[in-house]
DNA sequence: TGCCATCTTATGGGATATCATGGAATTTTA
DNA sequence: TAAAATTCCATGATATCCCATAAGATGGCA
């Protein structure tokens, strides 16, 4: 089984910016880092640009490579490629878990998403997100209400079954 | 034969949140976990978000993988995909049966569906549900009365045979 | 068909390991 | 050399493991 990022949890961010990555996510990061070996700590990538500036996104080494490969397929000097490289390559950084499973969010990163002393981690399958709790709640509410306003044939759950493999 | 989740049963939830999964369901979970082998314990997934927040839903690894695969076909940053990931990945968690066939419901999960010291397990074919007993009874009653109000051509039993594969 | 041996299931309690988090000590770097 | 970043150690809370038991279920056999 290939493990995916699942679940959500709330963690303290201390004065130094240290924050625990949920234990379940660590397993996924380990599996997704080809250089990981027992006893070491996995590397991964945090993207802070992207479509939504409101949260950070964490990718395993393997899944960010997939994205990189997709970008490489775009014409070399196209506007699209330029833009994606800017958002996904420029505005991202390698990270490594420390021995106790924490990362440190720099002042810059914390500022980027308005984080104080708490952070929400949310599993999104091939990636996870880090949110300031209030913003996260707003996001959920917005999602809920936009879901309620969908017509039957716009419902993504129902559309799923139509995409038969 | 592919076994499905069938039947309903009531189980105690102890102070640690431990609760036995019905023996019949275990067989289905084992068959639905590609990594299961005799002597180990099957993994599966519990979804607590979804359209109805009032119960937990358990899926085998195989059936949740089907869903994951469909979601992965949607464009990576599309609104639809984002929404489905949020409802299905974020609001779910991996679980593993212990050696005696139990799982533990975290405080958070118990709270989510208002469970005290008892839980009802209900088989629903490809998935099963976990309910707080009173809520389960209400659900049954509601279903009953809405069924009684259906006209002949709304009756799902009768519609069943019209959907030819 | 009544009885006993055995296995499975459901449940409980205590010991142990992992996780999340904080603080001090040490190193780096600007 | 002061501030920032990193490493090391400490601890309470939570989750996990291991063992125990009682009640059913199962099956054989006289």
Image: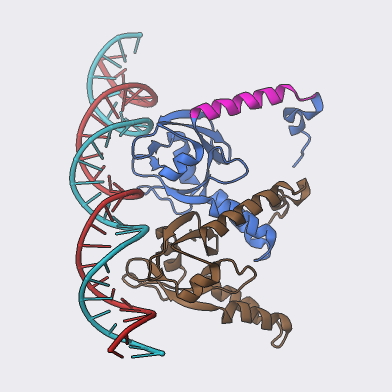
Chain colours: A brown, B blue, C cyan, D red
What span is colored magenta in the figure?
Answer: B133-151
* Residue B12 magenta-highlighted: no
Q: Nearer the viewer, residue A162 or A104?
A: A104
* Residue A102 visible here: yes
Is residue D13 depicted above or below B111 in this figure? below
Q: Position of residue B43 (x, y in %)?
A: 44, 49
Q: Which residue occupies 71% across, 80% down?
A: A80
* Residue B147 magenta-highlighted: yes
In the image, A30: left or right of B129? left
Q: Look at the magenta stretch and give its main secondary structure.
A: helix
In the image, A26: left or right of B5? left
* Residue B66 visible here: no
Q: Which residue occupies 81% across, 28% down?
A: B153
Q: Quadrant of residue A29?
A: bottom left
Q: How many marks?
A: 0
Q: Quadrant of the C terminus of chain A?
A: bottom right
In the image, A139: left or right of A149? left
Q: Position of residue B112 (x, y in %)?
A: 50, 41
Q: Position of residue A32 (x, y in %)?
A: 47, 69
Q: Nearer the viewer, residue D18 or B3?
A: D18
Q: Position of residue A143 (x, y in %)?
A: 65, 53
Q: Which residue occupies 69% across, 60% down?
A: B79
Is residue B139 depicted above or below A97 in this figure? above
């Amino acid at each position: 089984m290939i493990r995916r990022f699942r679940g959500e949890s709330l963690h303290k961010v201390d004065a130094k910016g240290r924050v625990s990555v949920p234990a379940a996510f660590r397993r996924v990061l380990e599996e997704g880092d080809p250089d990981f070996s027992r006893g070491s700590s996995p590397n991964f990538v945090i993207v802070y640009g992207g479509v939504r500036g409101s949260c950070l996104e964490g990718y395993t080494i393997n899944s960010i490579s997939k994205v990189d490969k997709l970008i490489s397929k775009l014409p070399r000097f196209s506007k699209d490629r330029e833009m994606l490289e800017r958002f996904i390559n420029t505005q991202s950084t390698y990270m490594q878990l420390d021995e106790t499973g924490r990362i440190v969010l720099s002042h810059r990163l914390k500022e980027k998403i308005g984080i104080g002393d708490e952070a929400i981690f949310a599993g999104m399958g091939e990636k996870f997100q880090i949110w300031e709790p209030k913003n996260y709640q707003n996001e959920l509410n917005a999602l809920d209400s936009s879901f309620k306003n969908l017509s039957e044939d716009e419902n993504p759950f129902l559309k799923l079954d139509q995409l038969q493999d």
